[in-house]
Amino acid sequence: MADNGSNSPIRNFLPRPRPAVVLTVDDVFPGRRNAPFEAGGDLEKGALGRLLWLLTRHPRLRMTLFVTPDWREVTPVPTSPLRHIPWLRDRCYLAPILPKGSMDLRRHSSFVSFLNALPRTEIGLHGLHHIHPGRRIAVEFQQQDVATCTAMMREAITIFEDAGLVFSRGLQPPGWNLPPALRAACAALGVEWVTSGRDLRTRVAGDAITAEGFGLQGSSLVFPQRTAEGLLHFPTNFQATSPAERAFEILDAGGILSVKAHITKQVPGHTHFDGVDRLYMNYLDRLFHDIEDRYGDDVAWTTMGEIAAGLRGQAGFATPRARPPAVAPPLEEAAIEQAPATTAPAAPRRAAAA
């Protein structure tokens, strides 16, 4: 489990918004097939096309893409012989990494333009390089001090701004780890909201606290809360391996159904259970249809950034940015092949992807 950095990172509960659905997708960067893997760089022909299909199927759905400004990770699994040598293994990169700048968004203008044109989509920060020396390669923020965290986050924000990427001042830290030094850096730089506490097992209740999983523990399982630094923290409480009943329990408790995905299903040495593949998209398609039928207008379809803006004092949820020219391909081009519904026992009630 990633360390949470303090015994009491959460300060207090906030006024509760109405039940809501938020969808967030991690690890987005301009990687294309085999370079080192497809993570959005193939635009509508890759995983982003599957997300566009889901948005087309659900006109009220919104999503947040957590984008890494200069991705360098090739694999999260240590492969170097140095991993067997004490002391050295904690100070060296234990797997191949991409050259600095190769995935810098300022060098990928078509990718940035595509992200800016996505309908009903919010962009958040996902670290700087998504790497760290030592055995926890993907956990970018570990023992760095406040000055180092501040410099890294400032560079990440500068890359977004220089590249012209429209983004919300929110962070999903790589590997979920949100230590005190990173929280202090975020507060100093004007980062408004964070998401860290991932708990897919704790039983749902209005007063449930994150106790199993990664990131911040001791935070609300279903509601946003302020950290001691004033950051608005959101949990993650649902993914591909979660049963649909958990989603209904969260919404019945008046909470935020925080659905997580990773843009890639498989990377060298690792498989994401919540990767954006055809099966997961079909499962979410069915789940979202069931939520629409069961709750109707009683549930808000929104983003973490919009909720954060609403809790700043604006009435209700914030108005999303104006929709740019649509870039979604025709449905038949973005269609997702039907796959066995192992994540949802019953067959889909509605038209599944072709």
Image (spheres, rainbow, N blue to C red):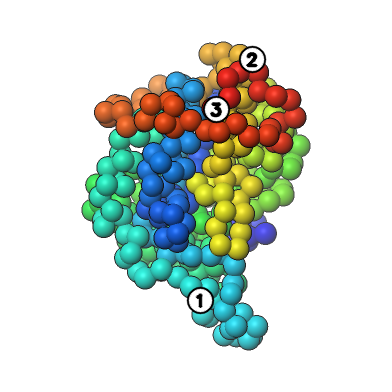
**In this figure, what is the number of numbered marks?**
3
**163 relative to 90, above or below:** above
Are the residues at dot 1 and dot 3 in contact (C-beta closer than 8 Å)? no
Give the structural element (helix, strand or loop) at label 1: loop
The answer to whether any part of residue 38 appears in the image is yes
Inter-mark Cα distance, 1 to 3:
41 Å
| Label whose residue precedes the other's in the sequence (1 or 3) | 1
- Quarter of image, res 305: top left
Residue occupied by mark 2: 294
Q: Position of residue 14 (x, y in %)?
A: 55, 33
Q: Which residue matches tag 1? A: 93
Rendered residue at 47%/64% (across/down): 73
Q: Position of residue 203 (x, y in %)?
A: 76, 37
Tell me which numbered mark, 3 or 2, is placed earlier along the sequence. Answer: 2
Which residue occupies 32% across, 32% down? Answer: 327
- The quarter of the picture where residue 334 lies is top left
Identity, as a three-letter code, of the amino acid under mark 1: Tyr
Q: Residue at x 30, y 51 (%)?
A: 160
User: Is residue 229 in view from this perspective?
Assistant: no
